[in-house]
């Protein structure tokens, strides 16, 4: 009796933490998305992405693993005047915090009742929001600890951008909470059993999609990373395994953000049952639909890198404060005033 | 209020081989100071030790990867003026054809650099792919893809091969349709317009006072082009427009170069249609008599000026080259006063400065 | 404004399904034209040792050396700028330009081609060669 759980529950917890949706799933998601991003963007630019590394000829499937192995065996360089404790700690905390957010998201309903998520709490939406809000502090800490001009400028810009775009996210989440009446993510998915929230709140969906692209640091809101004037932003000085951790934390964040939007707006695991998977276990077809919706959102977010230039910092803050926040407030008002039409459509308890 | 000195050094993702020293206060650039000389090779001294024919590869490398044929035209004009040489008609037409093809290639390369400066990598790859068509045409004509050594004193060195005309006309048709793609993806892109409109506005009176040349001057609204004011070779027989811009900001400077590609395609179609038959070269004496001359040509970046003093021997006594990037460089510190830091690459790239031109 | 944001999206997606433009060098190579100017080659039987090529080279890449009973030029490949002036001025067409462009070595001394290396024919080109072609009237250029 460890942690107040019996043996089958303990085995289930270890399965969840280590395989799905825990460590193995997040790393596999990061590897696949990195490979897909390089190949897809290369095709848009009329060139071939990774080519030679991998089992199947001409696809380069193992290229992310080859890059990871190369990075791990490089020398870790710490600048002379850096604050050593904070400098070495920041990438580890960045990766851990980003990986923690998948613990609160329900991926499928279990056949005997309950949900397949690592930790069940009736306030899971607030927990994920708190984790998202902690990210700017890590960036500022790493940027200051590196003791270099480019890092300082990049870290301050990252903090400005991320703090400014928290507000539209919270306002769209507020309208979802008004509509479904609970902070529990599992209950929100149950409430969408007859109609998805994207049909009832299209404006909120657009607001949260754009605001999530700004939170993650994706083109066109690319200013914290890869600037042309400020060489690479806050992780400029990191090499070796620390650089690998920083890169991987960016994709952990992408996994968490797309899972969140799928649960809130696209109906989570709901979809027609697939005959083959249903024979093995009825949970598997739910997981399949969840991953399918995550994949569509990932493709849309990745394509932003191929078609938009980068925005300037004052134009970005302008867009956030003067366009997105009013749209989110309008969505809340619409939700409040048209209550009598959508109340009968909400299923569940 | 503390002022930080930032050095965008010679090895930097966006400046090429230039060095700038910026005075930055927070996010605002107070002053910009260029520090040139990283790629200085001493071309004006090298030229004095070699004969006129041996100088052809040397002058070509003043601006080798973008616009070598426009550079060579000025050198040959000034020699032929001192010697009093008459170049045959077919050679003049071939010189114009190769120079206009090179201008299109140079403007496509400018589009690549502009999209890198704003952060759009897709528009880096597409113009480079289409530039392959033009480099392949020039390879059929002269044998090399970038450093041609195609024009010589008294004419050109190689003649047009068979099938060149039809292939060139087919490719020009394709390029004209492809320009619409560039408009949709880059110029009319909403984010690109946010980034470049009202950035780095150069007023016409300022442009004339500072001595800016080329498409930068035309984007500010001043209608000056050497091909129309003092026509050289056979430019007075073709019928083409000179596009001008309205505001003089970076968006106009980018759009005007796309319009110039369209005008170059127009000139090429007329030139390819009536190339006369005849010789491609006359005999040129190796000795240039005593005398001096000055000539101007319109390269892709602006106006090249050459001044030659010949003294009756086989080597020039003094050759002075006045490149367009050196004259345009003075606009950069003038425009970069009290702008946000993110605007400096945009202004620099839209002026189309090449460090090899500036340093020679 | 919305049209300007949405139109590049569909244009990019259209290009994702077109043929790529990359050449898988060095297994596949670009086909050189007949006039392509690569490394210079010498035909020893035709050389009459008139030294015109040595006089005209802008970089002093050619220099006369002894070979059995006559003098022939030796070629410094590190200094040559592929300008074709020596080929044009040779009175007996002893010099010609081949299509070989990958003649790099490890030391500077190896870059000076003595007459036996100077007169070697070029390496054979790879099995597959492509050129640039227009395959689609509006959107397509490819290497075939």
Image (cartoon, rainbow, N blue to C red):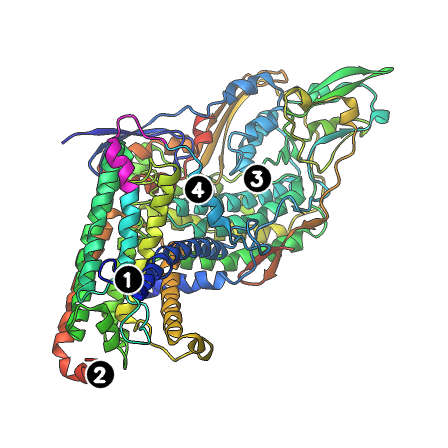
Position of B308 relative to B231 (above/below):
above
Q: Is the N terminus of chain A in the top left, top right, bottom left or bottom right quadrant? A: bottom left
Q: Earlier in the sequence, mark 1 or mark 2?
A: 1
Query: Which residue in the structure is indicated by mark 1?
Result: A118
Q: Which mark is residue A338?
A: none
Q: Dot 1: within a 10 Å radius of its alpha carbon, few (fewer than 14), some, or many (20 or more) residues?
A: many
What's the chain of the residue with tag 4? Answer: B
Q: Residue at x 32, y 40 (%)?
A: A235
Q: Position of residue A52 (x, y in %)?
A: 57, 49
Label 3: element kind: loop
Q: Judge left or right: residue B142 versus residue C92.
A: left
Give the alpha-carbon distance from disc 1 to disc 4, as whole Å: 71 Å
Q: Nearer the viewer, residue B105 or A227?
A: A227
What's the chain of the residue with tag 1? Answer: A
Give the alpha-carbon distance from disc 1 to disc 3, as whole Å: 79 Å
Q: Residue at x 23, y 36 (%)?
A: A144
Query: Which residue in the structure is indicated by mark 2?
Result: A345
Q: Which mark is residue B233?
A: 3
Q: Tell whether position A82 is magenta.
A: yes
Query: Which residue in the structure is indicated by mark 4?
Result: B225
């Amino acid at each position: 009796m460890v942690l107040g759980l019996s043996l089958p529950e303990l085995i289930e917890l270890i399965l969840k933490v280590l395989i799905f949706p825990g460590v193995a799933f997040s790393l596999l998601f990061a590897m696949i998305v990195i490979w897909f991003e390089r190949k897809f963007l290369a095709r848009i630019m009329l060139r071939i992405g990774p080519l030679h590394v991998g089992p199947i000829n001409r696809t380069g499937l193992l290229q992310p693993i080859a890059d990871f192995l190369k990075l791990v065996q490089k020398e870790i360089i710490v600048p002379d005047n850096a604050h050593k404790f904070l400098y070495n700690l920041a990438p580890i905390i960045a990766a851990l915090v980003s990986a923690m957010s998948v613990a609160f998201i329900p991926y499928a309903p279990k056949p005997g009742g309950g949900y397949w998520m690592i930790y069940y709490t009736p306030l899971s939406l607030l927990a994920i929001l708190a984790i998202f809000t902690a990210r700017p502090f890590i960036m500022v800490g790493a940027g200051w600890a590196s003791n270099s001009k480019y890092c300082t400028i990049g870290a301050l810009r990252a903090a400005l951008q991320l703090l400014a775009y928290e507000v539209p996210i919270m306002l769209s989440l507020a309208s979802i909470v008004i509509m479904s009446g609970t902070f529990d993510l599992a209950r929100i998915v149950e409430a969408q059993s007859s109609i998805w929230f994207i049909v009832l709140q299209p404006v909120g969906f657009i607001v949260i999609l754009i605001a999530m692209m700004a939170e993650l640091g994706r083109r066109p809101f690319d200013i914290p990373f890869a600037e042309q004037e400020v060489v690479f932003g806050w992780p400029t000085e990191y090499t070796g395994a620390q650089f690998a951790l920083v890169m991987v934390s960016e994709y952990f964040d992408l996994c968490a953000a797309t899972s969140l939007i799928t649960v809130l707006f696209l109906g989570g695991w709901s979809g027609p049952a697939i005959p083959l998977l249903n024979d093995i276990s009825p949970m598997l077809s739910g997981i399949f639909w969840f991953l399918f919706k995550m994949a569509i959102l990932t493709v849309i977010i990745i394509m932003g890198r191929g078609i938009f230039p980068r925005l300037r910092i004052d134009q970005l803050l302008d867009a956030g404060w003067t366009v997105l926040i009013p749209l989110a407030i309008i969505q809340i008002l619409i939700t409040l005033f048209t209550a009598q039409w959508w109340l009968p459509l909400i299923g569940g308890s | 209020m503390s002022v930080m000195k930032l050095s965008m050094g010679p090895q930097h993702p966006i400046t090429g081989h230039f060095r700038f020293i910026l005075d930055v206060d927070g996010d605002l650039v107070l002053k910009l100071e260029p520090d040139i000389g990283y790629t200085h090779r001493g071309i004006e001294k090298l030229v004095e030790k070699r004969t006129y024919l041996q100088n052809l590869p040397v002058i070509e490398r003043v601006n080798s990867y973008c616009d070598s044929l426009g550079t060579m035209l000025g050198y040959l004009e000034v020699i032929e003026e001192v010697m009093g040489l008459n170049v045959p008609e077919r050679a003049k037409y071939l010189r114009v054809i190769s120079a206009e093809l090179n201008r299109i290639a140079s403007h496509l390369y400018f589009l690549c650099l502009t999209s890198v400066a704003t952060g759009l990598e897709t528009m880096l790859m597409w113009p480079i792919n289409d530039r392959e068509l033009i480099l392949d045409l020039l390879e059929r004509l002269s044998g090399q893809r970038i450093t041609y050594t195609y024009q010589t004193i008294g004419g050109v060195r190689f003649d047009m091969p068979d099938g060149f005309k039809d292939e060139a006309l087919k490719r020009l048709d394709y390029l004209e349709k492809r320009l619409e793609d560039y408009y949709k993806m880059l110029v009319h892109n909403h984010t690109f317009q946010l980034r470049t409109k009202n950035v780095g506005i150069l007023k016409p009176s300022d442009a004339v006072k500072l001595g800016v040349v080329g498409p930068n001057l035309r984007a500010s609204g001043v209608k000056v082009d050497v091909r129309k004011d003092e026509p050289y070779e056979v430019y007075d027989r073709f019928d083409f427009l000179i596009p001008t811009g309205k505001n003089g900001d970076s968006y106009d400077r980018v759009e005007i170069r796309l319009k110039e590609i369209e005008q170059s395609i127009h000139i090429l179609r007329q030139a390819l249609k009536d190339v006369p038959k005849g010789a491609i070269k006359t005999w040129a004496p190796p000795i240039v008599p005593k005398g001096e001359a000055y000539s101007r040509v319109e390269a892709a970046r602006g106006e090249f000026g050459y001044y030659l003093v010949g003294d009756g021997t086989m080597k020039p006594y003094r050759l002075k080259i006045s490149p367009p990037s050196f004259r345009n460089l003075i606009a950069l510190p003038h425009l970069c006063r009290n702008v946000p830091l993110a605007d400096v690459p945009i202004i620099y790239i839209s002026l189309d400065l090449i460090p090899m031109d500036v340093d020679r | 404004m919305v049209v300007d944001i949405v139109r590049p999206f569909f244009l990019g997606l259209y290009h994702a399904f077109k043929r790529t433009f990359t050449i898988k060098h060095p297994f596949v190579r670009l086909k050189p034209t007949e006039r392509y100017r690569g490394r210079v080659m010498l035909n020893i039987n035709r050389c009459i040792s008139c030294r015109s090529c040595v006089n005209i080279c802008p970089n002093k890449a050619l220099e006369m050396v002894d070979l059995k009973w006559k003098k022939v030029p030796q070629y410094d490949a590190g200094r040559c700028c592929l300008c074709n002036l020596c080929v044009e001025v040779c009175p007996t067409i002893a010099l010609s330009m081949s299509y070989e462009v990958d003649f790099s070595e490890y030391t500077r001394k190896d870059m000076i081609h003595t007459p036996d290396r100077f007169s070697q024919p070029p390496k054979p080109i790879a099995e597959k060669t492509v050129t640039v072609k227009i395959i689609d009237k509006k959107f397509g250029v490819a290497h075939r």
